[in-house]
Amino acid sequence: MISEDRVFIEAWRAVANAKLTEFRRQCWRLALMVRQGTINKTAAIDRLYEMAVAHALVRALGDHRIQAILAEAFADADFRPMHSEVVA
């Protein structure tokens, strides 16, 4: 089982290296993991937004652009039970 913290740390490091392109890629990657029930949607979006702030993407592009990128990636990622909740 993959820990959420490890997934988020990997995403954070990747965004630090490639900024916007990588931020978009990580949004889609984490959205897919949400769809699979591997990680929590709210936690994923919160962490991605934190990364955007920390790496000056919000300051450079504006809050609306970051929110649009997140909304696009997570549009079909409805709230599903976490895999661990289903198994337990």
Image: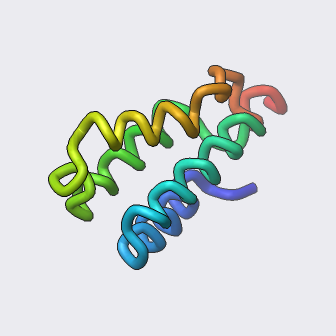
Tally the marks: 0
60 displayed left or right of 18: left
Q: Residue furthest right?
A: 87
Instruction: Write the residue at 47% across / 72% down.
Output: 14
Location of residue 34 by image quarter: top right
Q: Quadrant of the C terminus?
A: top right
Q: x%, y% of residue 32?
A: 70, 44
Question: In the image shown, does 9 or 57 lie closer to the viewer?
Answer: 57
Q: Position of residue 83 (x, y in %)?
A: 76, 36
For the residue pair 65 and 5, the one nearer the viewer reads as 65
Residue at screen point 69% across, 45% down? 33
Q: Is residue 78 above or below residue 59?
A: above
Give percent across and percent down for residue 21: 47, 65
Instruction: Return the residue nearer the eye: 52 or 68.
Output: 68
Point 80% across, 27% down: residue: 86
Residue 36, percent across and down? 77, 39
* Residue at the extreme left of the image, as rendered: 59
Q: Quadrant location of the N terminus?
A: bottom right
User: Which residue appears at 62% of the width and 42% of the height?
Assistant: 31
Image quadrant assignment for residue 6 = bottom right
**Does residue 37 sit above or below 24 in this rendering?**
above
Horizontal side, residue 39 vs residue 38: left or right: left
